């Protein structure tokens, strides 16, 4: 398949990118990131997490925002690379803000919040206090497992949804896999998603809303994509990364095969731009003038490097 050839070519040429050695590119990018994060530290209000920039103004969030663990996670990566204690101190301060999320049983995004932050902190330092936070979060996340649908519920039930499960939720399974690669809830969720979240071409539905009584999907829709039948690019990227990650932990070749098929959908898609940065939805109505999603591209790149 085309994507196999592409990955082979990437492997042959990976020592040089855009005419410069790979190690030089990495060094330059880390140096730039260090400067950017040091500037961000000065501008970030106390008790807040960075969220985005809008009209050149910094927008912040509290610990409940699903991306709240990304900032300390990035700081730990910078500390691991540079050994600059400034990044470690700032990471530790920011982690104090989100520690309470370990007990949040109303949120499915504990993997996003705490694996990026406390997961990297424990991996780098071995501090047992960080490990305890992660195991507490495991208990909170598994409280959202619904046996009748063999999945972890995403948002709470409401007048809008019966029991919604979103494609993003696959990413939170890493928290469970880290604690136990044979975790039955994570395995059931991953297998159920393979059956219900994917079309024949390995494109994805964003939301599968389940009937808790029958255990079957009641409808397949979108919340963030262009349409119910479209493929939201970040959701597709989550799926690619998640099944690659699941294979890393379990060595189950069904997950590897799933990741390869998803990669095939992405890399062979006729509307994937030449630079590999997808439009925000592969079926966005205003392509080629639609917004591009660099976040989706970053997730894809990380997954493809590991795959």
Image: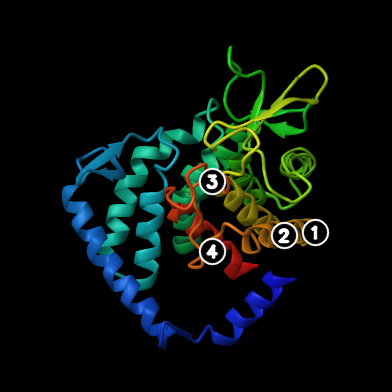
Indicate the secondary structure of the residue bearing disc 3: loop
Which residue matches tag 3? 281
Q: Mark 1 points at which residue?
A: 252
Please identify, in this view, whether the residue under mark 4 or under mark 3 is nearer the observer: 3
How many other residues sit within 10 Å of disc 3, few (<14), some (14-19) or many (≥20)?
many
Residue 128 is tagged as none
Residue 226 drawn at (x, y percent):
54, 37
Residue shown at 35% from the left, 65% from the top: 78
Residue that badge 4 annotates: 302
- C-alpha separation, residue under disc 4 versus residue under disc 1: 20 Å
Helix or strand or loop: what does disc 2 sit on? helix
Q: Earlier in the sequence, mark 3 or mark 2?
A: 2
Q: How crowded is mark 2: few (under 14 residues within 10 Å), some or many (20 or more)?
A: some
Residue 281, how many percent across, how many down? 54, 46
Instruction: State which quadrant residue 256 falls in.
Output: bottom right
- In the displayed structure, 219 sits above or below 133; it is above
Relative horizontal placement of residue 204, taking residue 286 as reference (left or right): right
In the displayed structure image, the side of residue 250 where residue 58 appears, left or right: left
Answer whether labels 1 and 2 touch (C-beta < 8 Å).
yes
Q: Residue at x 83, y 20 (%)?
A: 214
Distance between the alpha carbons at the discs numbered 2 and 4: 15 Å
Indicate the secondary structure of the residue bearing disc 1: loop
Query: Is 19 situated above or below 291?
Result: below
Residue 298 place in picture, x, y as percent: 48, 59
As measured in the structure, the alpha-carbon distance from the residue carrying label 4 to the one carrying label 3 is 19 Å
Q: Give the spatial CA distance, label 1 vs label 3.
A: 30 Å
From the image, tell me which residue sits under label 2: 247
The label nearer to you, 2 versus 4, is 4
């Amino acid at each position: 398949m085309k994507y196999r050839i592409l990955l082979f070519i990437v492997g042959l040429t990976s020592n040089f990118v855009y005419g410069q050695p790979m190690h030089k590119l990495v060094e330059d990018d880390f140096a730039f990131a260090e400067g950017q994060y040091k500037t961000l530290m000065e501008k970030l209000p106390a008790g807040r997490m960075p969220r985005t920039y809008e009209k050149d103004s910094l927008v912040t969030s509290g610990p409940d925002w699903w991306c709240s663990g990304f900032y300390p996670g990035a700081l730990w990566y910078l500390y691991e690379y540079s050994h600059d204690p400034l990044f470690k101190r700032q990471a530790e301060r920011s982690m104090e803000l989100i520690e309470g999320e370990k007990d949040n049983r109303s949120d499915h995004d504990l993997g996003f919040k705490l694996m990026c932050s406390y997961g990297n902190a424990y991996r780098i330092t071995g501090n047992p206090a960080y490990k305890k936070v992660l195991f507490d979060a495991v208990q909170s996340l598994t409280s959202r497992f619904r046996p009748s649908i063999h999945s972890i519920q995403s948002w709470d039930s409401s007048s809008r949804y019966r029991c919604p499960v979103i494609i993003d939720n696959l990413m939170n399974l890493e928290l469970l896999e880290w604690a136990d690669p044979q975790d039955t809830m994570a395995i059931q969720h991953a297998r159920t998603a393979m059956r219900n979240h994917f079309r024949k071409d390995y494109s994805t539905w964003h939301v599968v809303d389940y009937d808790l009584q029958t255990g079957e999907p009641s409808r397949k829709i979108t919340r963030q994509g262009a349409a119910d039948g479209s493929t939201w690019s970040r959701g597709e990227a989550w799926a690619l990364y998640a099944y690659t990650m699941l294979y890393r932990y379990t060595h189950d070749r069904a997950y590897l095969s799933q990741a390869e098929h998803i990669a095939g959908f992405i890399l062979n898609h006729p509307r994937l731009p030449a630079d590999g940065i997808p439009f925000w939805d592969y079926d966005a109505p205003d392509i080629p003038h639609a917004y591009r999603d660099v976040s989706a591209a970053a997730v894809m790149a990380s997954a493809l490097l590991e795959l």
